[in-house]
């Protein structure tokens, strides 16, 4: 199994076409979402970006 984890700082999923935005043009995101798993819910234990990244990495490993 191959996995790619994309982390963005301050990017709201509502601005991406795979999640319903009709104004943004992002063909690569649309193509990736068509052939991959997308998640509608996620959990971050803390709001500061560095702490959230650390928690995500510890769950992934």
Image (spheres, grey):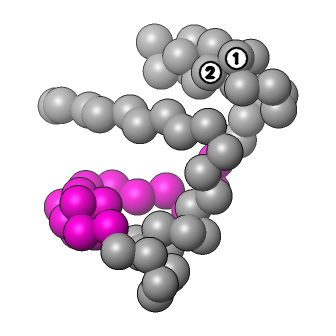
Q: Nearer the viewer, residue 2 or 31?
A: 31
Q: Report whether 50 appears left or right of 20.
A: right
Q: Position of residue 13 (x, y in %)?
A: 57, 61
Quadrant the C terminus occupies: top left
Crowding around mark 1 (Cα neighbors within 10 Å: few <14, some 14 to 19, many 20+) is few
Left or right, 44 with reference to 41: right
Classify mark 1: helix, strand or loop. helix
Left/right of residue 14 with respect to residue 24 in the rendered view: right
Characterize the local packing of mark 2: few (<14), some (14-19) or many (20 or more) Cα atoms within 10 angstroms: some
Are dots 2 and 1 in contact, CB under 8 Å?
yes
On screen, 53 above or below 8?
A: above
Residue 17 spot, x, y in % from top left: 42, 75
**Mark 1 sits on what residue?**
50
Q: Which residues are magenta?
A: 26-42
Q: Is residue 23 positioned above or below 13 on the image?
A: below
Q: Examine the rendering and report whether any part of residue 16 can be seen.
A: yes
Q: Residue at x 38, y 33 (%)?
A: 5
Quick check: is 28 in the magenta stretch?
Answer: yes
Q: Position of residue 40 (x, y in %)?
A: 56, 62
In percent of width and height, residue 52 lies at 70, 24
In the picture of the structure, the residue carrying the numbered disc 2 is 53
Examine the structure image and report whether residue 43 is included in the region drawn in magenta. no
Give the residue at x 53% y 16%: 57
Task: Quadrant for the N terminus, please.
Answer: top left
- Figure check: 59 above or below 42: above
Q: Can I make out residue 33 in this image?
A: no
What separation in Å lies between label 2 and label 1 (alpha carbons)?
A: 5 Å
Whether 48 is drawn above or below 4: the answer is: above
Residue shown at the point (26%, 32%) measured from the top left: 3
Residue 17, disc: none
């Amino acid at each position: 199994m191959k996995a790619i984890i994309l982390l963005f700082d301050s990017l709201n999923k509502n601005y991406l076409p795979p999640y319903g935005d009709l104004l943004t043009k992002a063909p690569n995101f649309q193509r990736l979402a068509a052939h991959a798993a997308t998640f509608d819910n996620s959990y971050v234990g803390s709001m500061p970006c560095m702490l959230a990244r650390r928690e995500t990495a510890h769950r992934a490993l």
